Amino acid sequence: MRRREFLALAGAVPLSAAAGPVPAASKLAADPHRPQYHLLPAANWMNDPNAPIYWQGKYHMFYQYNPNGAFWGDMHWAHAVSEDMVHWKHLPMALAPTPGGPDKDGVFSGCAVIDNGVPTAIYTGVNPETQSIATSAGDLTVWKKFSGNPAIAAPPAGMEVTGFRDPAVWKEGDIWLMALGSGFRGKGGAVLLYESKDLRRWNYLHPLVTGRMRAGASAKDPVDSGEMWECPDFFPLGGKHLLIVSTERVVKYLLGSYADRRFQPESTGGIDFGSYYAARTMTNTGDRRILWGWLTEGRNAEAQRAAGWSGVMSLPRELKLVGSQVQMRPAAEVEALRGKRLGAGAAGDCLEIRAEIDPGDAPRAGLKLRAAPDGSEQTLVYYDREQRLLCVDRSQSSTDASADRGLQSGPFVLGRGEPLRLRIFLDGSVMEIFANDRFCLTARVYPAGARSTGVALHASGGTAKMVSFEAWEMQPISPDRLTS
Ligand code: DQQ
């Protein structure tokens, strides 16, 4: 549900009445679609990662959360902590709307920085969209909202914007800079640039960059047409700068040069072409750029409510610039989850798979996953040479009618003689796919059969060869699928 629909609903129906019963923890803990080694809340809805930050030897993750059920609304910041970015523990809710305050209708997305030793969150309050500040200390469980909130009360005077939210903040010398998601009506998404000396008084500079919306688009929600860019993130990578934005249901990047507070994009690409949104990086991990994203669901709203949970956090991904290529790999820490090593004949729904495939003369080559012995369910992940795409065919992923069967794909080309190198993380309904360190696609699949766990080489129209294959059973990060 989009924000506008939520606000209409929130005005009409008490949230508690709309929520419905949350399934018992024992049901959630036994739900085979609930991941075992990805971060997700004990129950209910989650979306965007917020303010991932390293503080006093621990990684903290906040995220958009609805305490009322497995549907979008009443946004809070939930909180989890980890010593290694893979094993997580839930902590109490970090930020909730303040009645009568600028975030009375929701604590929307934002970031955190360390300001002279003080952890400081900068986030969007609604309604209307404004930017607010909160500070914390110690284990980051208690946050104090700034008495002068909102720190930014309105868009620049005279500017007709399609949205005004999701701050990303960094420091240059003594000056704090803020990138804010926005857009210009009838033109396209934009990122607005602000500066501040103290994180409380902000001065608008100019658009960091502007985009173009889809021609002829008439979507009601400006995000659907690219008229609004959400969740910007902006940081140095290699000798360049990378801007990440979420719009039109995908996460894009712009790679370019940044000088004198102006950004000149030079190339663009996709961060993930599947069920993945609102990505954001950790602000203070030194030279490492660790990216997080919200893994969106692939089944209908009713099924999500009935399940009692919705949304998953991605595994940490490390970004690097190699030549002019943005490299995207699972962070090395994820390997700590590897358990029993499996060879050919590996099967399961809680696995890491590494396969190198020579497509040979097959126009389509890759892997068959989550396959039932009787062929009733299967998911195909393959390189389509002619179409120059990496695809996930979910048309037979599940016999359950609530699951999305749409093909997911993104542009991908293998060089001459280059093998397809897949690294795939299966975890319940999650399938995080990395190809050749430069392409990511997250698929969500909900096989109904308990025996839909098979893994095999897939080729059509010719013969492909498995050059190498290894897999590991992945160890759960909690005994009860993080329901406690
Ligand atoms: N989700 C948040 C907004 C953001 C959107 C609200 C992106 O701050 O623009 O839950 O998914």
Image: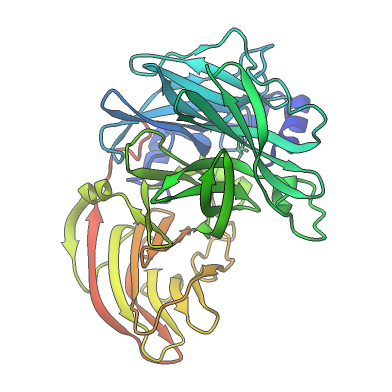
In the displayed structure, 106 sits above or below 213; it is above
Left or right: 81 as drawn, with respect to 335? right
In the displayed structure, 303 sits above or below 410; it is above
Residue 371 seen from this side: no
Q: How is the image coloured?
A: rainbow
In the displayed structure, 193 sits above or below 250; it is above
> Where residue 329 appears, x then y in whole percent?
35, 56
Left or right: 27 as drawn, with respect to 158? left
Front residue of 44 and 91: 91
Front residue of 265 and 114: 265
> Where residue 184 appears, x then y in whole percent?
77, 43
Tell me the quarter of the image containing the C terminus: top left
Ligand 1: quadrant of the figure: top right
Front residue of 198 and 275: 198
Tell me the quarter of the image containing the N terminus: top right
Residue lying farthest to the top in this orientation = 147
